[in-house]
Amino acid sequence: MEGSVGVGFMAVFAVSGSVVLLVHQVHKRLLSDFMKKVESELGSGKRRANKKKVRFADDVKEPSSNNKEYRKRQYSLNHNKQ
């Protein structure tokens, strides 16, 4: 009887060890897939950093360094048109 109890314990130990190894492998694979997904999400942020440069038309007016003076000129031009 003692021999069969020992064999039972060894069988339980072998099955539970196999389950632990299987769960560990599945967890490692899921974690790896998740990390790849996160890295690809973060990698797409790097591509956003390379933004296109804005080009204005040639007829766009550039304000002078003195904004008050520029606003006065624009106001007077717009006011005279009305």
Image (cartoon, rainbow, N blue to C red):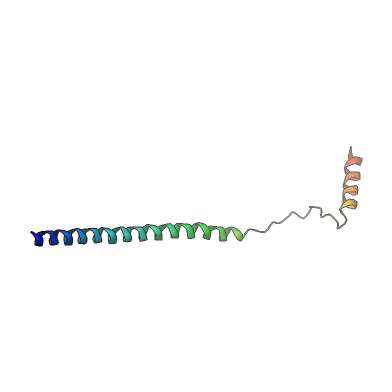
Q: Is residue 77 left or right of residue 34?
A: right
Percent x, y of residue 50? 61, 61
Residue appearing at x 17%, y 62% in the figure: 10
Percent x, y of residue 36? 44, 60
Location of the N terminus (image quadrant): bottom left
Residue appearing at x 87%, y 42% in the figure: 78
Location of the C terminus (image quadrant): top right
Residue appearing at x 90%, y 52% in the figure: 69
Percent x, y of residue 32? 40, 61
Q: 44 or 28: nearer the eye? A: 28
Q: Residue furthest front?
A: 2
Q: Residue furthest left?
A: 1
Q: How many marks?
A: 0
Q: 57 or 46: nearer the eye? A: 46
Q: Is residue 69 left or right of residue 21?
A: right
Q: Is residue 67 left or right of residue 27?
A: right
Residue appearing at x 45%, y 57% in the figure: 37
The answer to which image quadrant residue 28 occupies is bottom left
Percent x, y of residue 52? 64, 58
The answer to which image quadrant residue 19 occupies is bottom left
